[in-house]
Image (cartoon, helix red, strand yellow):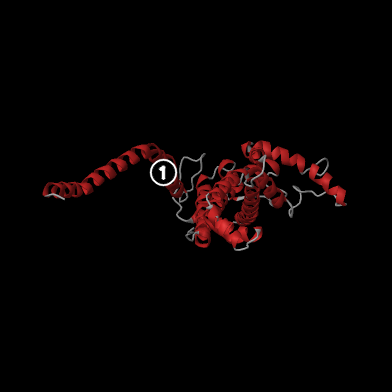
Amino acid sequence: MSTLDTTTSGAVGANRPSIRMRLSTREAVAAYIFLAPFIIFFSVFVVRAIFEAVNMSFYEWAILKPVKPYVGIANYQELFSDYVWWIALKNTIIFTVMTVAGTTIVALVSAVAVTQPIKGTGFFRVLLYMPQLLSVGVVGLIWVWLLSTQFGVINYLLSFVNIPPVNWLGDEFTVIPALSLTTIWWGFGFPMLIFIAGLQGIPDHLYEAAKIDGANSRQLFFYITLPLLRPTILFVTVTGVIAQFQVFGQPFIMTTGGPGRASYTVIYYLYEIAWRNFRMGYGAAVAVTLAGIMAVFTLFQFKVLGQRVDY
C-alpha cells in the first residue's frame, strides 16, 4: 500500500467515530420526536393523574362538600380496618389467580393446536379469537343465560350425567368460578395470538436435534417449547394479573356483587365508594393501595419467570 493510501485510510478511520456519533445523535433526536406525542399524553393523563390520586387520598375529598380537609393517613387507617375491603380483596385475588391461570393454559393449548401443520388452522384461529371482539355487556348477558338455573345450556348439559341444576351465580361457592369461566372464554384470544408468535419464534433446529435424539412429543413440549416460552408466559401473566385485578364489568352486570358480597371486587367497592357515596378521598386510598398490591404481584412474577432465555 502506498503512503497516500495509508494516509487516506487512516483519515477515514479517524473520521468514523464522529460519523457514527452524528448518526446516533440524529437517530436519538428522531426517536424522541416520534415519542414526544406519547410522552406528552402519558405525562398529562397518566403520571399527573397518579400524583393527583395519591394527593387526594390524604384528604376527606367529598364532591358535595366545598371544604376538603387534610386528614393524613386516616383514609388508609380506615381502609385497613374495613372488613368490606378485605372481603373485596380476597374475592379479587381468588378471581385473578383462577382467571390468569385458566386463561394462560387455555391460550397456550389453543396456540399449540392452531400452529400444527394441518389444514384449517387459519379458520380456527379466527373462531377462537372472536369472543375477544365482544363487549363486556354482551359477554355478561350471554353467560347469564348460559348459567341460568331454569333454561341455561350448561345445566341442561349437566342433566345428561344426572347432575342437578347448579345455581352458578346465586351460590357463594360457585359465583367466582362462574365469573372466572366467563372471563377465560372471553379473554383468551389475545394471549393465544401472543403464544402463537412465541411458538413461531422458536428455532426449528432445536426440535429437529431433539427428534434425532429420540425425544417424543411430550418431551419436546416440556423440555423445549415450555422453557423457551418463558418470556411469553411472563408477558401474558403480568398483563393478565394487571387486567383481572381491575375486574368490574362482569360482577357489575352478572351478579351486582352478590350473592351477599361473594363476588364483590375491589373496583366494584371503589365504584360504590366514589360514585355512590361520593367519598373521593377514601376511594383514592383504595385505588392507590390496589396499585401497590398489583406492583407487588408483578415484581413477584418477574422474580419467578424473568430469567434470561438463551436459544
Q: Secondary structure at mark 1?
A: helix
Count of labels shown? 1
Instruction: Using residue 62 as the reference point, say whether residue 19 is left or right of it.
Output: left
Tag 1: amino acid: Arg
**Residue that badge 1 annotates:** 48
Q: In this orientation, which residue lies closer to the viewer: 296 or 197?
A: 197
Q: Is residue 81 visible?
A: no
Q: In this orientation, which residue lies closer to the viewer: 264 or 122?
A: 122
Is residue 81 placed above or below 175 in the rendered structure? below
x then y, percent, for residue 24: 28, 45
The structure residue drawn at horizontal position 49% and vertical position 45%, both measured from the top left corner, is 61
x then y, percent, for residue 253: 67, 40
The structure residue drawn at horizontal position 31% and vertical position 41%, both measured from the top left corner, is 27
Q: Is residue 185 visible?
A: yes
Is residue 193 placed above or below 219 in the rendered structure? above
Mark 1 Cα-neighbour bin, 10 Å: few <14, some 14–19, many ≥20: few
The structure residue drawn at horizontal position 42% and vertical position 41%, both measured from the top left corner, is 42
The structure residue drawn at horizontal position 69% and vertical position 51%, both measured from the top left corner, is 176
